[in-house]
Image (cartoon, grey):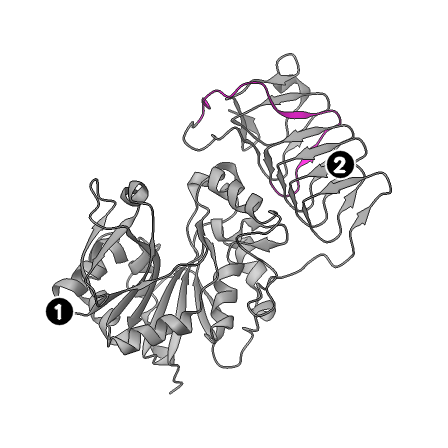
Amino acid sequence: MIKKEMIAMLLAGGQGSRLGVLTDTVAKPAVEFGGKYRIIDFPLSNCINSGVDTVGVLTQYQPLRLNSHIGIGIPWDLDRNVGGVTILPPYEKSDSSEWYSGTANAIFQNIAYIDTYNPDYVLVLSGDHIYKMDYEVMLDYHKVNHADVTIACMPVPMEEASRFGIMIADETGRITEFEEKPEHPRSNLASMGIYIFSWKAMKEGLLKLKDQKGLDFGKHVLPYCRDNGKRLFAYEFNGYWKDVGTLTSYWEANMELIDIIPEFNLYEEFWKIYTKADIIRPEYISRNAVVDRCSIGEGCEIFGEVYNSVIGPDVTIKKGAVIRDSIIMRHSVIGENAKINKTIIAEGAHIGDRVETGVGEEVPNVYNESIYTGGLVTIGEYSVIPNDVKIGKNTVISGETTIEDYQDGKLPGGSALLEKDGDPL
């Protein structure tokens, strides 16, 4: 039998609905980040940098682009004869067929895959966080404490603690209690959703709880382990970690990359972030172009001005265009004399000539004010914006729009212009 000390199970099936139109047709872990990367590149790179060479990626929602990106794992050195990366979608069984209904249910449905490697330890990861972590150091901590479960935790400001699963630990780090998003938190140690389980303890919990609806680690498996005498420990992490689960946090994390001294450095030699690079031709920046404090992807052609922005690969910015504080993803085109301000433009969008975004005052979004906020303009992938329109703040556009969709050539702040199946909403 093949024997691996530790394998990773990477949960990458979530929609990430708080990212709005960015995840209409793509799973959240496959959303572009930092220009040439996708969000899933970070946990995958952490795995190979930590010596974890066997990774099961559990997919479900809109997996096509994610599957294509991961392939057989070549960019991360995970194309192994033994181990490597394996895509694990839900599948039909002889007695049932079901979607993954919770984080722990997804692992339960893949017990046979884990047993193939007969691991001592299983590392459970989320596919939608931006961070660098050496999982080998966390495993050493797990072993020293003879733990059954080790939960990576991060200190957060006390006033934000109610947004997280909170761990209460004694002076040795052993977890005595935990609270899921408590109204009055008694600790500021927040779970990062990164776990190391001793496989024996995890398998016992999964089998005992297998009939639990929506089987989840935080709600079911961890309480079971605590109540049945298992040793749970908190591993405190103090590095950079960002949950890019909302449009505002996603925009902020991208903007942090282009600080003069970035808090999160993508280019450290000793801890590289690997990705699949489709575009290999160089950038072209014309003689009259201006590029100031930006990240520019491969194959871009820039004839206009770009300030404080993250530009993905193969983006064309035509002459006279001015881009500020924006994220423009791969294969997009920005028309002549456009003025793009604090805007997220998804892959393959086409912005017409003389378009202006981010104009006017901030007002709440009528479609979903909790998602489309922060003064951002969000434009979905392969959307088309016609020439000569002005678009307000806290707006969202998705689909091929025409000038007739814009009253007097304007989309007021807080508006939504969405197409589903070709029909405007």
Q: Residue furthest top?
A: 408
Q: Is residue 8 above or below residue 394?
A: below
Q: How many labels, in total?
A: 2
Quadrant of the drawing holding the N terminus: bottom left
Q: Give the range drawn in magenta.
A: 346-367
Along the line of sight, which residue is nearer the eye, 265 or 79?
Answer: 265
Along the line of sight, which residue is nearer the eye, 304 or 32?
Answer: 304
Q: Is residue 353 magenta?
A: yes
Disc sitting over residue 88 in the figure? none
Instruction: Tell me the distance, in whole angstroms, between the alpha carbons under discs 2 and 1.
Output: 61 Å
**Residue 85 visible in the shown view:** no
Q: Where is residue 123 in the image (x, y as percent from the top left)?
A: 36, 68
Q: Where is residue 238 in the image (x, y as percent from the top left)?
A: 40, 59
Q: In this view, does 392 lie above or below 219?
A: above
Mark closer to the observer (2, 1)? 2
Q: Name the residue under label 2.
A: 305
Q: Is residue 241 above or below residue 134?
A: above
Q: What element carries label 2?
A: strand
Mark 2 Cα shell of 10 Å, populated few (<14), some (14-19), many (≥20): many
Q: Where is residue 334 in the image (x, y as percent from the top left)?
A: 72, 35
Q: Is residue 118 left or right of residue 292?
A: left
Disc sitting over residue 229 in the figure? 1
